[in-house]
Amino acid sequence: MRATRALTQAGTLSEHSKAGTGDRAFLVLEFDFTETTPKGKPTVWAPLLERCEGEGITALDIQAALLAHLATERPLWMTVFSGSKSLQGWFPCRGEDEEKLLVWFDSRAMRLGACSSTRCVSQFVRMPDGTRAPNRDGKSVRQTVEFYNRQTLQEAATTEATAVAISLAKDSHRPLSTAKKL
């Protein structure tokens, strides 16, 4: 974050604004498949969920499979359970071109049913191992980390450090061997 509060596009001060958001460090994908809308009408996912339920496959199983599939294209750092009905996959992307990242998001993730909400860099996502507000029963629910791959961040950090070293070498006209020692 750049600031605790900043101006929204409408010009009001808010803790939830694009102006207060820093560069994206993770692209968080959420699949939120339900059989009915909040108004009780069937969703586009209802027929698929009913067929899968008959085979013992849950909506969370489907979401996990989709995240695993997308992890063959981009490294997946962790998966967080919302505490209710969805999984969020955290894909490291610090320093990547936002436009190219969103092309991937639109053409791959959304095509598989990912929610469009996390396309926005200022969208709130689940806090890993945090607690969400009390549910209908008045109980606070833990947002558990269901999958974690430490190596993904280590590789991302190595890639980022290499990119910084190359950038420093180009900017200062030093040989790359000197920049590697930084």
Image (cartoon, rainbow, N blue to C red):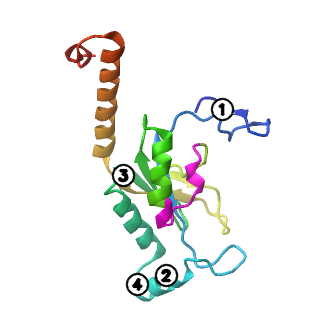
Tell me: residue 55, above or below residue 128.
below
Give the residue pinned by disc 1: 4
Return the x and y of residue 140 as percentages of the image width and height: 60, 59
Return the x and y of residue 27 as percentages of the image width and height: 47, 47
Of badges 1 and 2, nearer the viewer stands 2
Residue 1 placement: quadrant = top right
Give the residue pinned by disc 3: 76
Range of the magenta residues? 110-121
Disc 1/disc 4 C-alpha distance (Å): 45 Å
Labels 2 & 3 near each other (Cβ < 8 A): no
Give the residue pinned by disc 2: 48
Labels 1 & 4 near each other (Cβ < 8 A): no
Labels 3 & 1 near each other (Cβ < 8 A): no
Residue closer to the observer: 78 or 20? 20
Mark nearer the N terminus (3 vs 1): 1
Mark nearer the N terminus (3 vs 4): 4
Determine which of the numbered discs, if any, sits on residue 56 in the image.
4
